[in-house]
Image (cartoon, helix red, strand yellow):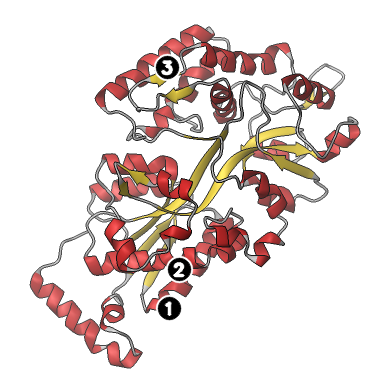
Amino acid sequence: MRKITKREFIKNSTLALAGAAAYNLTPQKAYALRQLKFWLGLGATAGDPMIEFGKRAAKKYGYNVTYDNLVGEADTKFAAAFGANDLPDLFETDSPYIAGFLGIDALDPMDDLVKQVNYPLHKMMPFLVNRSRFGGKLMALPHGWNSWVLLYNQNHLDKAGLPTDREPENIDEWLEWAKKMTLRDGSGNVVQSGFECPKSGILPNNIWGAMLYQYGGSIITEDGKRTNFNNEAGRKAAEFILNCLYKWEITDPDINQRYDYWLTGQGSMFYTGTWMVGSSLKQKGMKFRTDVMPILGDKRAVQYEYSAFVLPYGDSDEVKEAAVNIYKYFIENAGEFAVASSQIPVTQEGLSYPAYTRSDHKKHFQPSEDNGQHAFWDVAHSKGSEFAVYSGDGAVTRIMDKVWLKEKSVNEGLNELDKHLTKLLRKEPASV
C-alpha cells in the first residue's frame, strides 16, 4: 500500500471532514469514507452472505467499501499483492494460510485495535482465540469454523440393515459396516464404496492424518521443532489406507471427484468437512447423518480449521480501525451470519441464536460443537502446505501418494517425508 505524505494526509482529511456535515458523520467516520478494498476467498454459499454483512457494517459506520470474491485464488493473489505493495485493506482467509503470510511479514497484529474498538473477544470460543495467536500476538479474528466429520448415507445403512442412529463402536464394527455397504458390478468393480478412499489425492492423505493422530502420532512435536510420524503411529495409519484399498477392498480406488461421488449416492461413508453439510442437504432424495470420526485407532482425534479476518500490513491507523470495526459486526451478529453462511458460530451466543438452533444444519453441526475437544490442526508454518494433511500439492500428498500407488513401501515414504519436513523445521520451527 503506497505511503502518503503528510501534505496528502492533511488534504485528504480536510476533504473528508468537509463532507461530514452532509452525511451527519463523526470525524472518524468521515475520514474512512475513502474507498476500502475487501478481498475474500469464499464460495457463493459463504461469500455472498459475507458481502451482504460487510455492506451492512459499512453502512453502520459510514465506510465506502468495495468487495472482491476471489474464489480459489485469494491467498496466492494476496501474497502477490504484498510483493507489489498493493494489498487490500480487509482480507478473509483460512487458518492454514496465516502462518505463510506471517512468514513474509504481510500481516499486522490486532491486540491494541480490538481493545480500542471494544471488540467482543471474550464472547468468542477460547480455543479459537488461542489458535489465532502467533508468537503471543493476535493475528486473526475467526468468523466461522469447520471440523472434519464422517458423513453416513442413511439410505445405504437402511438397505444394509445397519443402525442409523449411532456411530460404529470400534474398528471391527466400522469395517463390517463398510463391507456390507460396498457394492460391485458383474465384473467385480466397486460401484458403491462403503468408505471413500481413492489411491491418490487429498482424501487418502487426509484420512492418513486423522488415523496418525488417532494412533497417538502427529505431524510435528508440541514444541514445533521435530517430526512425529515416522514411527509406529505413522506406519499403522499408512497400513489403514492400504488395507482400505487392497485388503478390505471397500472403496473404488479411482474416485476422481470425491464430492460428486458422495452427492450422487456412490459413497456410503465419506470423511470430509462440515462445509459439505449444506450441499448434502440440497441433494434431492439424500438422507444422511453426521458424526465426528469414530475411534478406529487408540483415541478420538478431530481435525479443525477456521476462516478468519486478518489485517494486511501497512495501512494507516484510521483504515485499520475501520477494518476491525467491520470485522466486529460479524461477531456481534455471529448467529445470524452462521445461518446465512452455513457455518458453525464462533460465539456461545451464536450457538444459541434461535434461527441457528432451528436450522437444518444444526443437527449435523452439533457433533462438532465441542469447544475443540480432541482437536488437531494443520501445521502453522510459512511452508504450511508442505506439512498439511489437507493439501492437494503439499509434500504429504506428493510423497505419500507413491505409497498408496505401491510405488514405494510405507517405510520408504515415511523416511522421504521425514527427511523433507525435518529440513524445513531446521530452518524455521513451526508455530505452536
Judged left or right of residue 264, residue 41 is left
Residue at which label 3 appears:
417
Q: What residue is shown at x 80% (from left), y 25% (from top)?
A: 177
Label number found at residue 101: none
User: Based on the displayed image, in which of its 4 quarters is residue 432 positioned?
Assistant: top left
Q: Earlier in the sequence, mark 3 or mark 2?
A: 2
Residue at which label 1 appears:
60
User: Based on the displayed image, in which of its 4 quarters is residue 100 positioned?
Assistant: top left
Q: Earlier in the sequence, mark 2 or mark 1?
A: 1
Of 350 and 338, the residue lying toward us: 350
The local secondary structure at tag 2 comes to helix
**Given the image, on which type of amino acid does mark 1 rest?**
Lys
In the image, which is nearer the foreground, mark 1 or mark 3? 1
The local secondary structure at tag 1 comes to helix
Please say if 120 is above or below 379: below
Q: Earlier in the sequence, mark 1 or mark 3?
A: 1
Q: Position of residue 64 (x, y in %)?
A: 36, 74
Q: Position of residue 7 (x, y in %)?
A: 8, 74
In the image, which is nearer the foreground, mark 3 or mark 2? 2
Q: Is residue 31 visible?
A: yes
Q: Position of residue 367 (x, y in %)?
A: 66, 44
Please say if 422 is above or below 331: above
Judged left or right of residue 97, residue 155 is right
Residue at which label 2 appears:
329
